[in-house]
Image: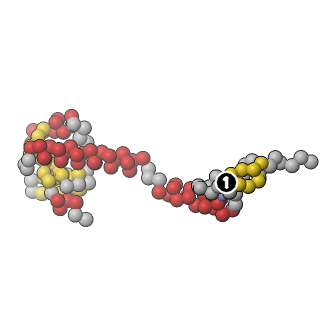
Amino acid sequence: MQQPKKTERTCSYRNCENTYEGRSDKIFCSDQCRNHARRDQLKTEKWNAPAFYDKISQIIKNNHKILKHQFEEKGDNTVITNFLLRDSGFNFEFHTRILPTSKGIYRFCFDYGWLELENGKILIVKNDRMVEI
Ligand SMILES: [Zn+2]
């Protein structure tokens, strides 16, 4: 009877460079390396964030950048049109915190926020308390 083909191979686990002889479908030098590799794989799967984590935090960071830019350019109590914000890529759907006041509901992306006024106007504000945890 013919033996399964055996070849000298190098372990596939990280930096392990042990060589071993074995069947062609064997990829680790030892049970230890195989177990480590499996453990690493589970860890990666567990911590692999779903795509929306990155996507949404990107949107919020971009919103923050736009608000900060407007605020720094025009100063406190900046009022701009919502078209201007939208045109610069602002996404009104995503924010980190809300602050209900008698004037209305402020929405914040970290420390910069906005309040929708009448006629499509937007008030941009900065509030450091909105990033206190
Ligand atoms: Zn190994």
Quick check: can you spot residue 95?
yes
Report the residue at 16% width, 39% height from top. 82
Q: Nearer the viewer, residue 6 or 106?
A: 6
Instruction: Please state the horizontal and vertical placement of residue 120, each as a whole percent of the image.
Output: 12, 39
Quick check: can you spot residue 28?
no
Q: Is the residue at mark 1 in contact range of ligand 1, meaning its CB lies under 8 Å from it?
A: yes
Report the residue at 23% width, 51% height from top. 109
**Residue position for label 1:** 11
Mark 1 burial class by Cα count in 10 Å: few <14, some 14-19, many 20+ = some
Instruction: Please state the horizontal and vertical placement of residue 124, each as a whole percent of the image.
Output: 13, 47
- Residue sitting at the far bottom: 133
In the image, taking residue 33 as reference, residue 24 lies left or right, namely: right
- Residue sitting at the far right: 1
Q: Please say if 133 is above or below 111.
A: below
Report the residue at 16% width, 36% height from top. 84
Report the residue at 44% width, 50% height from top. 50
In the rendered image, which quarter is residue 42 located in? bottom right
Question: Within the displayed image, which quadrant is ligand 1 positioned in?
Answer: bottom right
Q: Secondary structure at mark 1?
A: loop
In the image, taking residue 13 as reference, residue 58 lies left or right, namely: left
Instruction: Please state the horizontal and vertical placement of residue 28, each as a whole percent of the image.
Output: 68, 55
Q: Nearer the viewer, residue 11 or 37?
A: 11
